Amino acid sequence: MPELSQETERGQAAQPFGWAEVTGPSMVPTLHNGDLLVVSHRGRIRPGDVVVLRHPFQQDLLVVKRAAERREGGWWVLGDNAYAGGDSTDYGVVPDELILGKVRLRYRPRKADQRSPFALARWALSAVRPVFADRSASRRLRAR
């Protein structure tokens, strides 16, 4: 289950954006371990958005998941990696008050072994990417 740094919550009320660091494989291939995220604390959540939320049973733990669909009582959230677990199939619907924000941007830090000019150019072209909503999340939900 991916944990996120607690920096996401610092200044949440005062600032419209925060950041988080991903640890864990549940959002692969969209997000990888070590990715840094820019999180918007304002705005409407829609199906397919990648969101940061408090774990319903361990509220000191922050996780990142995809909001699959709106249900009575909150959001059904899923990880992009179906084999990693740790989503609504384990803990059910997530209440709205536990959703902290929507992920807007992903920064993937350079790995130490990326030293060749080709590897550096490839990293430079893909290091910063917006995180878009995946509207196929509801199709994946029906498949589970």
Image (tube, grey):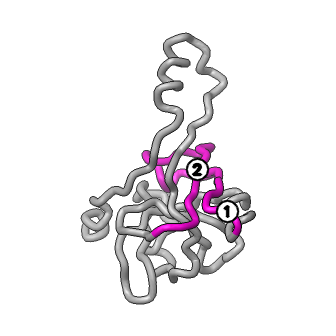
Residue 140 image point, x, y percent = 29, 63
Of the 4 image quadrants, the one containing the C terminus is bottom left
Please identify the residue farthest to the bottom as the structure is shown. Answer: 72
Badge 1 amino acid: Gln
Q: Residues within 10 Å of mark 1 (few under 14, many from 20)?
A: few
Q: Which residue is drawn at the image coordinates 64% and 50% (left, top)?
A: 21
Identify residue type, mark 2.
Answer: Leu
Camera-nearest residue between 125 and 76: 125
Residue at 43% x, 45% y: name it: 29
Is residue 16 rendered magenta in the image? yes
**Quarter occupied by residue 135:** bottom left
- Image quarter hosting the N terminus: bottom right
In the image, residue 55 lies at what x, y percent?
60, 73
Which stretch appears magenta? 14-43
Q: Is residue 20 magenta?
A: yes
Rendered image: mark on residue 105: none
Secondary structure at numbered mark 2: strand
Q: Residue at point 43% right, 63% down?
A: 66
Q: Main secondary structure of the magenta part?
A: loop
Q: Name the residue carrying label 2.
A: 37
- Name the residue: 51% across, 83% down: 95
Cβ atoms under marks 2 and 1 closer than 8 Å: no
In the rendered image, the vertical position of residue 95 relative to residue 138, given as above or below: below
Is 128 or 109 nearer to us in this picture?
128
Identify residue for label 1. 15
| Distance between the alpha carbons at the discs numbered 2 and 1 | 15 Å
Q: Position of residue 14 (x, y in %)?
A: 70, 67
* Image location (x, y in percent) of residue 57: 62, 80
Mark 2: few/some/many CA within 10 Å (<14, 14-19, 20+): many
Q: Nearer the viewer, residue 128 or 67?
A: 128
Q: Is residue 9 above or below residue 80?
A: below
